[in-house]
Amino acid sequence: MSTYVFGHTTPDSDSIVGAISLSYLKNQLGEDTIPSRQGEINPETTFILNKFGYEKPLLKTNYADENVYLIDFMESSQSPEDIAKATILGIVDHHKLGDLKTTTPLEMWVRPVGCSNTIVKQMFDYYNIEIPKDLAGMMMCAILSDTVIFKSPTCTKEDTKACKELAKIAGIEDYKAVGMEMFIVKSDVLNATKRELVLRDFKDFNMGGEKIGIGQLEVVDLNVFDTMKEELFEAMKELKIEGERHSVLLLLTDIMLEGSQLLVLSDDIEKVENAFEVKLENQQAWLAKVMSRKKQIIPFLEKQF
Ligand code: MG
Ligand code: MG
Ligand code: MG
């Protein structure tokens, strides 16, 4: 029986590349694994797969009675619905400790670094397994994506080190230029519906029993959103109602200005204002220096619930 390796719902580049890289490593170690994914691939990840000649992992949303490795998440809210019926053999992640439970002992590689693929790179080194050139290129891109080309406060020395070593294996000299190319692809928000944009990098969290959905769009120029704020709010409102969410937040992150415009729909606006010590105007606020949902949004919001 094959073991499935997959990342979170609404997969990002780290989740998709991580499924591929971790599955490759495990197979080299003699296991029988298949990379899979819980949802559609975003334009940035499509760019990465095309650039390095890889296929999308298998789309699979049910995992009852399967053996699985999880990468880039460990929250039930980002898991398949039947995760409790799967056997989790291991977790490779760089997020806060989640609420998943296991019935058997498991392998865990969890580190406070900027990207899961940094950890996978360390696993390759640990087992002394060679990384194929194109896989190294994809892992490099995943690190550049998650760390916003090293600008995110989540980025550590281990990430920059892993990224540089992967670039070398991939034969890429100017890896930051590849990162910029990737973020320009990511900045194309005109060819998608507003709902698709809000959902592009969207995660649900359980905070004190309330469901909070937080989306993030990272672009090279925030002005692209100027004419679409109202429609973004409409899409957020839809998601708030149909998902019975207490709050829906959307972070519009400008990677050049290194800050985020926060859009908020909430049953308790004050909690959000208190979390970030701001007054919302038209349900919005500019959060200077805020680039990371994981490090600069979730912990502060969680304290309010
Ligand atoms: Mg991720
Ligand atoms: Mg990640
Ligand atoms: Mg991210």
Image: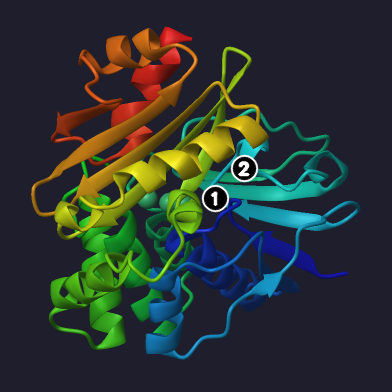
Residue found at x 45% / y 51%: 201
Check mark 2 vs ligand 1: CB closer than 8 Å? yes or no. Answer: no
Q: Is residue 143 above or below residue 237?
A: below
Residue 277, given in percent of the width and then of the height, sits at: 21, 13
Residue 61, given in percent of the width and then of the height, sits at: 76, 58
Q: Are marks 2 and 1 in contact (CB under 8 Å)?
A: no
**Can you tell which mark lies on residue 78?**
2
Q: Is residue 105 above or below residue 61?
A: above
Residue 66 in view (yes/no): yes
Residue found at x 31% / y 61%: 145
Residue 305, given in percent of the width and then of the height, sits at: 49, 10
Q: Quadrant of residue 63?
A: bottom right
* 66 relative position to 13: left or right: right
Residue furthest right as drawn: 65
Residue found at x 45% / y 77%: 46
Q: Mark 2, residues whose alpha carbon is within 10 Å: few (<14), some, or many (≥20)?
A: many
Q: Secondary structure at mark 2?
A: helix
Q: Is residue 95 above or below residue 189?
A: above
**Can you tell which mark lies on residue 297?**
none
Q: Is residue 226 above or below residue 304?
A: below
Q: Quadrant of residue 241?
A: top right
In the image, 67 versus 257, the foreground residue is 257
Task: Read off the residue under disc 1.
Answer: 92
